[in-house]
């Protein structure tokens, strides 16, 4: 409101373009109290004034038609083609009827008849013309994104609904466009160049949208949306955008990613369509090969599946659909392998989807942070199981549990783990904590702090999937740990690739130098078993000994032992 009040109070400037001095003077007399007046005596002179740097913004031009040097129609034509001036409203001052139509076609906003009659009428028309044009500018400014000129989200959504209502095309595509690694582009070329890129993308999209009965909006940061006629050839569509962009932009070191959702049901909420296009757009982040991704039946099923799992989790925990499996780890240092411990691995017996392995739901639960609830459940189950075995078999089998990187952000992680241990009458030393090496990437400081704290409370730390991340050595150097578990892919590849075999050897050397227990997982064959044993690994986990199994089956190992 304040802005609008200020806008109403400023004294605006009007330019009068007329070759007859007497007409200039009459208008000055009528309008001079309310407005600042500039005058020019022909179109050329008016243009010269407009092109000076120092003049105030012009709110209105009053334009005579018949003038020497450059007449009013010529001036109209020129000014309506200039970006800086085309929005200035123009009132044509005319005696002849036929000039009215011509000037209307050229973009004049109104007419005033000469000779001038009642001053009040002239004042009223001037005021109204200025108000109308300013309202329009305010509306345009509010509905468009300032940097790129694309529609804002709300306005875009509103226009999509209108397009559907008037059924411009029977089928439309919702497209979300994003710049791959835009933050890197910003880093390398600077924010200004980044802004120019965004502006150029918007322009390229607008061009393509225009020829496809479509519109363009900016969703957020480097995300744009388009709603346009359904396409048949998406390669050609992608290329048409890319080619336009290359034409505008000097640096071509960027890649656009595009998510496409074809809308067949126009009653579907526009936000849902945008979400779907964005979902498949974001999926491209991990794969660098495809430039676009289409939301199809498979994606839909997957996302329904994911939503269901997230929704079902609390009930699943309560109703014990989650079940802990145990995979034995054998100590292979002596002649005969000896059961050393186990790893607890979670499974979900879903009433509708059946048996689900953790790869299907753990990453999903990590994304929305609810993996904590699974982990708490597992820690308690395992602690209780260790206690039970201790009672039944008279010995303690240490079990390792997986601690998600998400758990590292939980300020209660220590009390929760301690509770699990104490409530079941075991010691922290019995519960091994597997922390995947890549947890170090996302929050090293956090991780180091939590791990140190856990160590002080007596828990043993096992670095899981060692060698799978990109800061393996950093993690080793900064985390206090007891056990190092080599990532499975090394064992899988070691006989196919000489270098990998060397890595397996090097990790063994590192373990010995650091004086920690060395574990290799994913050992499936006798050959691998013998090789790994020979290389000095202490403990082996893998299908060669056993898959992860139910409690009852795991107890066979306890009995044999
Ligand atoms: P991980 O912690 O690295 O667990 C080892 C995975 O390797 C397990 O897969 C296990 O079944 C599999 N495996 C063991 N030996 C072999 C072998 O010889 N050959 C092959 N091909 N695979 C073998 P699983 O049970 O599907 O678990 C996958 C991942 O899910 C785990 O990787 C872990 O990151 C996560 N996970 C499992 N349970 C939990 C849990 O309770 N909490 C959390 N946060 N994550 C869990
Ligand atoms: Mg593990
Ligand atoms: Mg592992």
Image (tube, rainbow, N blue to C red):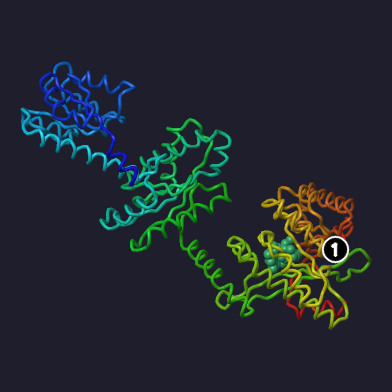
Q: Find numbered disc 1 in the image and state the secondary structure of the residue it sits on.
A: strand
Answer with left or right where residue 361 lies relative to residue 540. left
Q: Position of residue 449 (x, y in %)?
A: 75, 55
Q: Is residue 432 above or below residue 59?
A: below
Q: Position of residue 495 (x, y in %)?
A: 79, 53
Q: Is residue 513 above or below residue 245?
A: below
Q: Position of residue 447 (x, y in %)?
A: 72, 55
Query: Residue 89's quadrant in the figure?
Result: top left
- What residue appears at the point 16 percent right and 27 percent down from the top-left corner? 63
Of 253 and 37, nearer the camera is 37
Which quarter shows the C terminus? bottom right
Of 148 and 332, nearer the camera is 148
Query: Residue 266's quadrant in the figure?
Result: bottom left
Q: Residue furthest bottom?
A: 392
Quadrant of the displayed image that contains ligand 3: bottom right
Answer with left or right where residue 503 lies relative to residue 176. right
- What residue appears at the point 91 percent right and 63 percent down from the top-left corner? 333
Q: Position of residue 203 (x, y in %)?
A: 39, 38
Of 531 and 410, nearer the camera is 410
Q: Residue furthest front?
A: 33
What crowding class fits label 1: few (fewer than 14 Cα within 10 Å), some (14-19), or many (20 or more)?
A: many
Answer with left or right where residue 334 lies relative to residue 233. right
Query: Residue 558's quadrant in the figure?
Result: bottom right
Q: Residue furthest top?
A: 69
Of 269 and 205, nearer the camera is 269
Q: Is residue 382 above or below residue 27?
A: below
Q: Residue furthest right?
A: 335
Answer with left or right where residue 467 lies relative to residue 109. right
Mark 1, residue position: 539
């Amino acid at each position: 409101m304040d802005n609008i009040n200020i806008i109403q109070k400023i004294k605006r400037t009007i330019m009068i373009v007329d070759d007859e001095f007497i007409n200039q003077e009459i208008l000055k007399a009528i309008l001079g109290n309310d407005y600042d007046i500039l005058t020019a005596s022909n179109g050329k002179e008016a243009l010269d004034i407009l092109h000076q740097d120092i003049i105030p913004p012009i709110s209105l031009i009053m334009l005579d038609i018949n003038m020497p040097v450059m007449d009013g129609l010529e001036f109209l034509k020129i000014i309506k083609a200039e970006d800086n001036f085309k929005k200035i409203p123009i009132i044509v001052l005319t005696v002849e009827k036929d000039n009215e139509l011509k000037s209307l076609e050229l973009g004049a906003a109104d007419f005033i008849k000469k000779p001038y009659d009642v001053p009040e009428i002239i004042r009223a028309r001037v005021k109204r013309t200025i108000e109308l044009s300013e309202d329009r500018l305010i509306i345009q400014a509010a509905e468009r994104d300032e940097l790129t000129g694309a529609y804002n989200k709300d306005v875009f959504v509103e226009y999509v609904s209108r397009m559907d209502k008037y059924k411009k095309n029977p089928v439309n595509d919702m497209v979300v466009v994003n710049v791959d690694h835009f933050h890197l582009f910003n880093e390398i070329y600077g924010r200004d160049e980044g802004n120019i890129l965004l502006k150029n993308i918007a322009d390229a999209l607008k061009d393509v949208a225009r020829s496809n009965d479509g519109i363009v909006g900016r969703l957020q940061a480097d995300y744009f949306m388009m709603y346009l006629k359904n396409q048949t050839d998406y390669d050609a569509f992608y290329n048409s955008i890319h080619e336009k962009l290359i034409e505008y932009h000097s640096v071509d070191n960027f890649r656009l990613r595009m998510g496409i959702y074809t809308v067949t049901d126009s009653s579907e909420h526009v936000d849902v369509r945008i979400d779907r296009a964005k979902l498949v757009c974001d999926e491209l982040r991990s794969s660098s090969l495809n430039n676009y991704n289409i939301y199809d039946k498979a994606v839909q099923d997957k996302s329904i599946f994911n939503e269901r799992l997230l929704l079902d989790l609390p009930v699943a925990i309560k109703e014990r659909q989650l079940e802990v499996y145990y995979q034995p780890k054998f100590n292979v240092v002596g002649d005969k392998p000896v059961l050393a411990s186990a790893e607890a691995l979670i499974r979900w017996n879903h009433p509708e989807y059946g048996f689900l392995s953790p790869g299907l739901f753990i990453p999903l639960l990590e994304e929305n942070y609810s993996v904590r609830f699974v982990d708490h459940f597992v820690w308690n189950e395992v602690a209780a199981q260790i206690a039970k075995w201790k009672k039944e078999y008279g010995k303690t089998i240490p079990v390792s549990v997986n601690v998600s990187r998400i758990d590292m952000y939980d300020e209660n992680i220590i009390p929760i783990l301690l509770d699990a241990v104490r409530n079941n009458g075991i010691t922290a030393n019995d519960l091994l904590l597997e922390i995947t090496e890549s947890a170090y990437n996302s929050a090293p400081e956090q991780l180091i702090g939590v791990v140190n704290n856990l160590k002080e409370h007596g828990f043993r730390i096992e670095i899981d999937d060692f060698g799978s991340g990109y800061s393996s050595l950093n993690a080793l150097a900064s985390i206090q740990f007891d056990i190092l578990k080599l990532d499975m892919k090394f064992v899988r590849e070691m006989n196919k690739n000489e270098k990998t075999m060397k890595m397996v050897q090097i990790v063994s050397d590192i373990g010995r130098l650091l004086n920690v227990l060395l574990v290799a997982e994913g050992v499936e064959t006798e050959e691998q078993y013998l090789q790994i044993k020979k290389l000095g690994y202490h403990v082996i986990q893998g299908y060669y000994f056993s898959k992860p199994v139910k409690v009852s089956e795991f107890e066979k190992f306890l009995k044999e032992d």
